[in-house]
Amino acid sequence: MKKDQYIEIVSLLFSALFLYSGIDKLTGYSVFREQIGLTPLMSPIAGVLAWLVPVAEVIIGLGLLLPSSRVPTLGMALGVMLLFTGYVIYLLNYDDQLPCSCGGLLESLSWTGHLIFNGICITLSTTALLWHYRDRQTKSEGKSLFYN
């Protein structure tokens, strides 16, 4: 598989994940707000997060569909996955009985399952970004000041 194809496939997978997750949270806003409000760490800002998280997910999901914004948006997706992973680690250490606010298949995962899923997503996106920037660096090193 070529690097460009890998980046495109990873971007499309992330787009589907983020769009589905964001839309699901927006359509179930009251449930999502209530669930994140149960977390002591999040309860003071649950109202803001209940809008911010799904809107950011939808924006990232749409950005991954556009070739011109794919790579920077993939970086944003990686950042969000790292934040989600930090949240899962927090839950595993302090209160793993809280309900999951994810939708669909992810809803049935345990918190450990979420951690594994997030690790896979982080690996896929990191690999795609590293390949992109390594390829870009290799191409720029081949150019000289006088010959393009």
Image (cartoon, grey):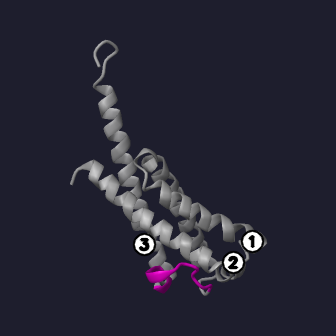
Q: Secondary structure at mark 1?
A: helix
Q: Secondary structure at mark 3?
A: helix
Q: Are marks 2 and 3 in contact (CB under 8 Å)?
A: no
Image: 61 above or below 43: above
Q: Secondary structure at mark 2?
A: helix
Q: Quadrant of the C terminus?
A: top left
CA separation, marks 2 and 1?
A: 6 Å
- Residue 145: percent from the left, percent from the top? 34, 14
Label at residue 33: 2
From this viewpoint, which residue is outermost toward the top? 146
Q: Amino acid at mark 1?
A: Gly
Q: Residue at x 59, y 83 (%)?
A: 96
Q: Amino acid at mark 3?
A: Phe
CA separation, marks 1 and 3?
A: 27 Å
Q: Residue at x 60, y 78 (%)?
A: 27
Image: 107 above or below 15: below
Mark nearer the viewer, 2 or 3: 2
Residue 117 in the figure: left or right of residue 50: left
Mark nearer the viewer, 1 or 3: 1
Q: Earlier in the sequence, mark 2 or mark 1?
A: 2
Q: Earlier in the sequence, mark 2 or mark 3?
A: 2
Choose top left, top right, bottom left or bottom right for residue 57. Answer: bottom right
CA separation, marks 2 and 3?
A: 23 Å
Q: Which residues are magenta?
A: 98-108
**Residue density around tag 1, few if under 14, some if 14–19, many if 20 or more, within 10 Å:** some
Label at residue 47: 1
- Residue picked out by circle 3: 117
